[in-house]
Image (cartoon, rainbow, N blue to C red):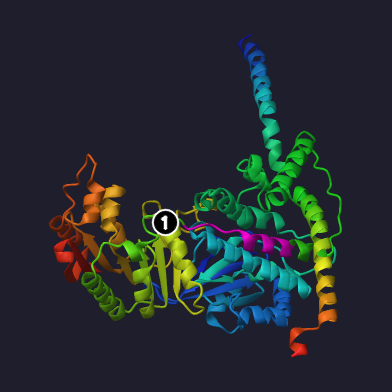
Amino acid sequence: MIRNEKTDVASRLKANEGSFRDPTNRVYEIKLDTTNSGKSRIFRGLNEKELAKYTELSNEPFFQKLVNTGRVVKTEVVDATDEDAKSILLDGWYGVLEHEAIPFVTYPYEWTFSMLKDAALLQLHLIEKSLENGWTLKDASPYNVQWVGSQPVFIDVPSFEPWIEGMPWVGYRQFCSMFLTPLMLRAHLGIDHIPLLRSYIDGIPPVEASKYFTGLNRLKKGVLSHIIFPAKVENSITKRERDNAPVQQRKVRKFSKSMVIGLVQSLDRLIRKLTIKIEHTDWSQYDKTHSYQEPDFEAKMAFVLKHSSSSQSGHIWDIGCNTGTFSKISSEFCNQLISIDGDHNAVEKLYLSEKKNKNNNILPLVMNLSNLSPNQGWAGSERQAFDRRNKPNLILCLALIHHIRISSNIPNRMFLKWLHSLNSNVILEFVNREDEMVIKLLTNKKEQYEDYNLNEFIYEVGQFFEIKDRESLKGGKREIFFLTPK
Amino acid sequence: MNNRDKEQHRIPLIFKLYLILILFTPSMAYAYVDPGTGSVIVTSVLGFIAAIGYTFRKYFYKLKRKIFGNKTEDD
């Protein structure tokens, strides 16, 4: 069985802390170097039965097609002579698979509505293709979907298993609570799915979801079938079984393939019809309403271009990205660009435009910088905090700091200290007091943030970073810096 | 004398603890209700309805192709 993770390759080998629920396999990561965005190898230790199953699956044409089209992560059986694989075999596994590493791990509570929708459609597509070929998937969790640029990729290969005639679709409840319900809450009621998914780590159960749908809302697409009906069934079972200590044996029901495929296809049709309207928010019209005149905008773009192209950037973060105007400029010069903003609709706009390019490398995420994704799950380590994952080589922090200081009340020094902890170069745009955006923020505020000014900022920056380049913009109202960590 | 008094006082305390345990037992039983049972019932009902639609669609398109032929074949 699994011993302690320390082996001869102990310093580089790490068992993935989110991969422990399935006793038949476990994911490991081996870092090839410790620099920011340093490469890793991702392995999966398998028991004998799992390896045999994988060997059979990998010979199936439908599975090969899914891998070749990038729907399922590239996977290979690793030879026992591979040095890194040996350490995993020593941990008690029978065989080892290697997966292509996902550049940056994300979780469903960081995705936009359409990202969750596309991940759900991918899950259903995999189930349908599998069923057509005598296989199925035993899970239905968005944690099994990751992103390469703006394309969803399924990573949990052991989820595939042979279809046994008469088997029910065991993943249905999980699919509903983790994919369908949050999408329906958003599409039908306008409820933000992100705080719900962050808190309900196993998804929103039907009994809970049914409390949101009252009155005529119950008649909206899919609600009666997939929320109200399951909630009523669960309530009646709970009432019956609560006081009878021995749980009654489930009656065995036979399921035909057409029942499962029929249900999967009906869910696919339902999800395709779920949409949201992107209302104009402060940021979703950024490309039309930013406060720059054309020449200054060109100057800002040129500065960003100059320093993005010269940095050896495997991995760039654009924090406070709005609709991704500057992400798109910088994405040419790196392997992966993560665009983050707290405004859902702005990020949704970016995702919808980026997903059309199959080979793009921008991954848009919704996240409030003053409330980063925390450590979650069992022992607070199943799902990693945002700043504990792969670190970037370059961070774009454009026209953000005035919001951090004035709207979120976070002192500049604390923000810079956090930025510095990421050990990355930074392109930072400081928005001065004279700028109309700051004036707008300070209007009607009792606190006037007297310490928020350019000189004070330069002093604070100097505690953590070297200023390698700087330029004035908008006639001195803004100052853009290129910083390297001290 | 003292020891016997103490023993007589001990028993009622255990009795009180037992009462408290009983009060909390109903909510503990929720943790033992298997969500899978409900799921099987729901998927068999929804699946049954969906299977009708699926089978109908399958034969409808087969029939359509037989009557009108595949577009590519006609060209």
In this view, the residue farthest toward the left is A455
As for residue A177 lying within the magenta part, the answer is no
- Residue A39 is left or right of residue A257, and the answer is left
Residue A334 visible in this rendered orientation of the protein: yes
Q: Is residue A384 above or below residue A234?
A: below
Residue drawn at x 68%, y 48% is A227
Residue drawn at x 38%, y 68% is A324
Residue drawn at x 82%, y 76% is B64
Residue A257 visible in this rendered orientation of the protein: no
Residue A114 placement (x, y as % from top left): 54, 63
Q: Quadrant of residue A295?
A: bottom left
Q: Is residue A239 above or below residue A160?
A: above
Mark 1 crowdedness (10 Å alpha carbons): few <14, some 14-19, many ≥20: few
The quadrant in which the N terminus of chain A is found is: bottom right
Query: Between A263 and A276, which is closer to the camera in this rendering?
Result: A276
Residue interval drawn in magenta: A264-278
Q: Which residue is mark 1?
A: A280
Residue B56 placement (x, y as % from top left): 83, 66
Q: Quadrant of residue A329?
A: bottom left
**Given the image, what chain letter belongs to the residue carrying mark 1?**
A
Query: Between A411 and A30, which is closer to the camera in this rendering?
Result: A411
Query: Between A177 and A227, which is closer to the camera in this rendering?
Result: A227
Secondary-structure class at tag 1: loop
The quadrant in which the C terminus of chain A is found is: bottom left
- Residue A476 is left or right of residue A213, and the answer is left
